[in-house]
Amino acid sequence: MPDTPVAPAADTFAPSPESAPPHPQANRDSFGYQVHDRIEGALGRTGTIDTPHGQIQTPAFIPVATKATVKAVRPDEMSELGAQAVLANAYHLNLQPGTDILDAAGGLGKFMNWPGPTFTDSGGFQVMSLGSGFKKTISMDSSRVANDDAVAPEHERRAFVDDDGVTFKSHIDGTIHRFSPEISMKLQHEIGADIIFAFDELTTLFNTREYQVESLERTRLWAQRCLVAHRELTAERSHRPYQALFGVLQGAQYEDLRRKAAQDLGAMEVQGQSFDGFGIGGALEKENLGTIVGWVSEELPENKPRHLLGISEPEDFFTAIENGADTFDCVQPSRVARNGRVYTADGYFNIPQAKFKRDFSPIEESCGCYTCQNYSRAYLHHLFKAKEMLYSTLCTIHNEYFTVTLVDKIRESITQGRFYEFRDEALGRYQGRKV
């Protein structure tokens, strides 16, 4: 355990209960979570999240529709491949087209013609990715450097954090913008997603422990402000469906900080408003993924869902689910598809390789996706080499189907009481790299 003491919970935020307006309870009943089956000897479980736009059976992978679209794929195609919900990005939608546009359209779902549940992240990720240029949230090497002002090579610092919020330059046109807990809540309410996230500071593993302690307290105070703003906006916008607010847990690779974050936010209540669920965020070393998820799952309320931000590799799903995570999101399946990589049960491969030029088999013989049912590796190879846009559509459909279906199969294995057997079978085959 590290020697540096954890900062005590400050009492600088103490809203007066008697001054609080009546709690906007009317629409809250449209959101809920129920636990069903459990993994024997572990923290993992299955469950159902109820939202105003439908249910999410968990564990579940939530594809990322950054700018109100999963790149290259129509919403109805996402539904057909099995996606239960999608996650959009508050930072990007604020810059383009503007959250007021989505609000006027009736919210994210109506704007993008997606009838199911929706998520938005808070914009906190951009504090790290724009501020330092370190884009990955897992597989970072914490031994390489300890520097609170670390910036990725050839990257200009574009975001500056203070106790009130973050000031940053737009990556589109360089204009200056400001995010705070209150602004993030306002933007996410205008976007209108069913599940939204509290504004947090995402540190890197390169930050010192001293800074991690300071940042954790900043995020805790921001979480309180988010609860107040969320309550007020919910009351003002009672004509809209209730939006569930998830608190985000930071603490990097430190057990005491992660547990403290889970204890603080798990018990946090301001003017009768508490968090409806929790996001497990932050930079972490891949080999410690399960350990960190386990730490926070042991501390969090059992009756609220846990969303792990930013993972999509098969081994990470099994590890995270076993240790208590319920839902996940990541841009990886669509991003690597556009660059030529496709997943199969026997590992992944790259379509542009010359050996696929005359390969008339599908990406995967046993796959039920639209792409594998109708197209060959040779055709996809041709589309990629010819720089045809259809390539991105077809391979993204396959990768999203693979990822969504894998998590669905994990959920089924828990219900059947054979999680460990399925894990060993699936990872043994995938990591065997027979392709």
Image (cartoon, grey):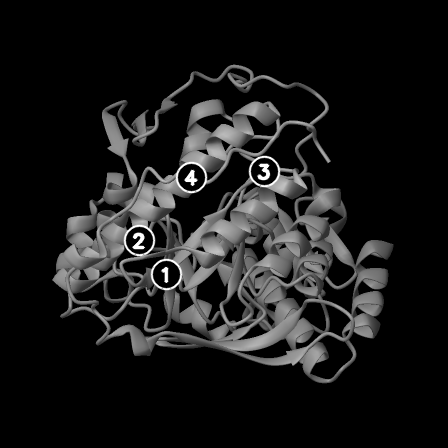
Front position in the image: 329 or 181: 181
Mark 1 or mark 2: name the one nearer the start of the chain. Answer: 2
Point out the image quarter for the C terminus: bottom right
Q: Which mark is residue 306?
A: none
* Amino acid type at image mark 1: Ser
Q: Secondary structure at mark 4?
A: helix
- Estimate the x, y position of residue 196 in percent, counting from the top left: 36, 57
Q: From this view, report whether residue 379 is shown above or below residue 413.
A: above
Q: From this view, report whether residue 287 is shown above or below residue 109.
A: above
Q: Name the residue that disc number 1 marks.
A: 274
Q: Which mark is residue 219?
A: 4
Of badges 3 and 1, the one in the foreground is 1
Residue at screen point 19% across, 57% down: 233
Mark 4 or mark 1: name the one nearer the start of the chain. Answer: 4
Mark 4 or mark 3: name the one nearer the start of the chain. Answer: 4
| Residue 272 visible from this viewpoint | yes
Q: Name the residue that disc number 2 marks.
A: 227
Q: Name the residue that disc number 3 marks.
A: 283
Q: Within 10 angstroms of label 4, few (less than 14), some, or many (20 or more) residues? A: many
Q: From this view, report whether residue 431 is shown above or below residue 304.
A: above
Front position in the image: 68 or 258: 258
* Amino acid type at image mark 3: Ala
Mark 2 or mark 3: name the one nearer the start of the chain. Answer: 2
Q: Are marks 1 and 2 in contact (CB under 8 Å)?
A: yes
